[in-house]
C-alpha cells in the first residue's frame, strides 16, 4: 500500500467513490471504518488512505427476499465479505454467483438517497480472468 500524508475525510458513505483504510503509524495496524485512535494500541497517530478497491472474496451470501421499499432492486442480492489488498475486511454487494476465493474489485452503485444527494453502495465485481 502506498502511504501518504494526505488524510481524506470523505468516502463512499459521504458520496465519494472510495473506500478509506486507516493505518496506525505506531504499530502498523490497519482497519476499516475510521477511528481517531488505533484500536490495537490506542495511538492517535493515524493516517487514512484510499484503498485500491481490489481484494479477494472470503464469504458471501445471497438474499432472495429484499427489504420492504426496495423497489429498485428485485433481487436476489449478493452480499460479500472481501479482504482488501490493504489487509482489511469490508462488506459490500456482489453478484449472487460470486465464488469464495475469487479476486474482485469495487465499483460503486448509485442509489436514490434520503436527501437530494444520491447514495453510493460498494459492489464487488469479478476481477479475474
Ligand atoms: Zn497502533
Image (cartoon, rainbow, N blue to C red):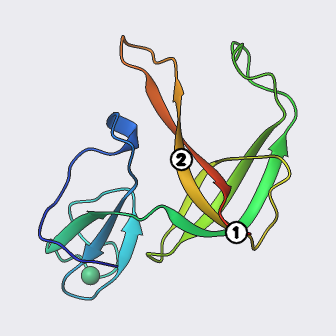
Q: Which element is circle 2 on?
A: strand
Which disc, if any, is residue 102?
A: none
Query: Residue at point 47% right, 33% down?
Result: 120
Q: Is residue 111 above or below residue 123?
A: above
Query: Residue at point 79% right, 68% down?
Result: 100
Q: Quadrant of the C terminus?
A: bottom right
Rendered location of residue 71, percent (x, y): 72, 13
Residue 74 horizontal side relative to residue 49, left or right: right
Asked which quadrant contains residue 3, the reply is: bottom left
Residue 10 horizontal side relative to residue 127, left or right: left
Tell which circle, 1 or 2, labels the residue nearer the N-terminal end.
2
Residue 90 horizontal side relative to residue 41, left or right: right
Q: Ligand 1 quadrant?
A: bottom left
Disc 1 vs disc 2: which is toward the camera?
Answer: 1
Asked which quadrant contains residue 29, the reply is: bottom left
Query: Residue at point 47% right, 77% down?
Result: 87
Q: Please name the residue that numbered disc 2 is placed on.
A: 107
Q: Please name the residue that numbered disc 1 is placed on.
A: 128
Amino acid at each position: 500500500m502506498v502511504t501518504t500524508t494526505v488524510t481524506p475525510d470523505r468516502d463512499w458513505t459521504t458520496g465519494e467513490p472510495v473506500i478509506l483504510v486507516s493505518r496506525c503509524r505506531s504499530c502498523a495496524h490497519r482497519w476499516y471504518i475510521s477511528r481517531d485512535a488505533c484500536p490495537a494500541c490506542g495511538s492517535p497517530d493515524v493516517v487514512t488512505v484510499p484503498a485500491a478497491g481490489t481484494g479477494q472474496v472470503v464469504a458471501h451470501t445471497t438474499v432472495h427476499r429484499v427489504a420492504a421499499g426496495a423497489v429498485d432492486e428485485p433481487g436476489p442480492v449478493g452480499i460479500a465479505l472481501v479482504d482488501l489488498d490493504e489487509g482489511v475486511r469490508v462488506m459490500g454487494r456482489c453478484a449472487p454467483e460470486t465464488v469464495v476465493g475469487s479476486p474482485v474489485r469495487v465499483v460503486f452503485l448509485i442509489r436514490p438517497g434520503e436527501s437530494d444527494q444520491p447514495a453510493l453502495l460498494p459492489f464487488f465485481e469479478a476481477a479475474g480472468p
